[in-house]
């Protein structure tokens, strides 16, 4: 019985993880601040509030900036990216609610009067991982 328990515990501890790479097109490297990426596994808090499943920072001075994540399992995810120029850890908005700092979401969905939803931005990360490309909006 102990051998079965030990084997099951070892299998649980070595559950396969998957890699997600998010390439960032259009990052304006001359702007100050950090470019941060967040991966969400549910609509709760997407795209900028609540607790993401994973966070990463991009090297905005790189020739091809990107964020890389190690996710706990294959599944449905959505990505939100922000260029936090002033370091307040949120996407600032003007009086009409339009972003005044750079942003992007997976599937590159944009709307004139609201942000993209989780359902519009979600995609599948298979067991062998995934790479996606998002376009920054300023």
Image (tube, rainbow, N blue to C red):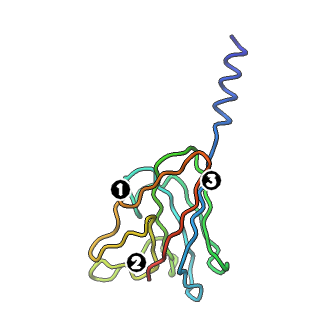
Query: Percent from the top left, x then y, of residue 105?
Result: 44, 67
Q: Earlier in the sequence, mark 3 or mark 1?
A: 3
Q: Quadrant of residue 28?
A: bottom right
Residue drawn at x 68%, y 36% as measured from the top left: 14
Q: Mark 2 or mark 1: name the one nearer the start of the chain.
A: 2
Of badges 2 and 3, nearer the viewer stands: 3
Q: Secondary structure at mark 3?
A: strand
Give the residue at x 71% y 13%. 2
Q: Earlier in the sequence, mark 2 or mark 3?
A: 3
Towards the viewer: 34 or 74? 74
**Is disc 3 in contact with disc 1, using a CB cutoff of under 8 Å?**
no
Residue beneath disc 3: 19
Q: Left or right? Give the position of 8 relative to 117.
A: right
On screen, residue 121 above or below 28: above
Q: Secondary structure at mark 2?
A: loop
At horizontal 51% and vertical 52% (from top left) the residue drawn is 53
Look at mark 2 in the image and give the residue it sits on.
Answer: 92
Say whether marks 2 and 1 touch (CB < 8 Å): no
**Number of numbered markers:** 3
Q: Where does the N terminus fall, quadrant-wise?
A: top right
Q: Give me the C-alpha separation between circle 3 and circle 1.
A: 21 Å
Q: Give the labeled residue for mark 1.
A: 119
What is the distance, in whole Å, between disc 2 and disc 3 at their CAs?
30 Å
């Amino acid at each position: 019985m102990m051998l079965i328990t030990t084997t099951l515990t070892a299998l649980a501890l070595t559950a396969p993880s998957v890699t997600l790479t998010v390439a960032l097109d259009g990052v304006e490297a001359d702007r100050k601040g950090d470019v941060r990426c967040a991966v969400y596994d549910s609509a709760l808090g997407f795209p900028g509030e609540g607790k993401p499943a994973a966070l990463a920072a991009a090297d905005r001075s790189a020739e091809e900036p990107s964020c890389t994540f190690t996710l706990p399992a294959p599944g449905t995810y959505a990505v939100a990216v922000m260029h936090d120029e002033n370091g307040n850890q949120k996407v600032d908005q003007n009086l009409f609610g339009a972003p005044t700092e750079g942003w992007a979401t997976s599937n590159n969905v944009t709307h004139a009067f609201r942000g993209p939803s989780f359902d519009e931005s979600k995609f599948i990360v298979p067991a062998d991982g995934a790479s996606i490309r998002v376009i920054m909006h300023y």
